[in-house]
Image (tube, helix red, strand yellow):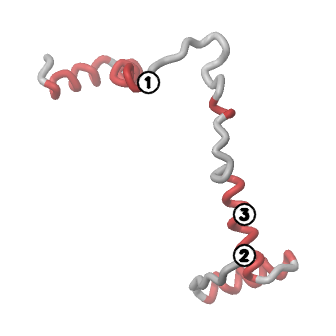
Amino acid sequence: MTRPTNILLDESSRAVARRRAAERGLSVSGYVRELIRADDAATGADSGDLSALIGILGSGSEPTDIARDKHALIAEAFGEDYENRRQRRAGNA
């Protein structure tokens, strides 16, 4: 079921929307719906598909527990200086 939605456009944006809709043989409403569907498809918001993340480390990589090892991983990425500062802030140095 479709429901009406009002949007406010300045004259320039409205002119662009009307022109682009006409180029596609659509109404402005149809053009806006097309933009929303395209944006949603581009972000993958409706799928929830995580398959692209499976195996991201490669077949030979060992799994990690990022939550448990986050400080060590950050220290490794940014050098020991980060870990030393973190320990001083925590009162461990």
Residue 58's disc is none
Which residue is drawn at the image coordinates 67% and 58% (left, top)? 40
Disc 1 secondary structure class: helix
How far separated are the C-alphas under marks 1 and 2?
44 Å
Disc 2 secondary structure class: loop
Circle nearer the N terminus (2, 3):
2
Quadrant where the N terminus is found in the figure:
bottom right
Left or right: 57 as drawn, with respect to 74: right
Residue behind mark 2: 1
The amino acid at mark 1 is Ile
Left or right: 8 as drawn, with respect to 85: right
Residue behind mark 3: 37
Picture quadrant where residue 20 is located: bottom right
Residue behind mark 1: 66
The amino acid at mark 2 is Met
Which residue is drawn at the image coordinates 66% and 80% (left, top)? 3
Task: Tell me residue 7's x, y (percent).
Answer: 59, 83
Picture quadrant where residue 15 is located: bottom right
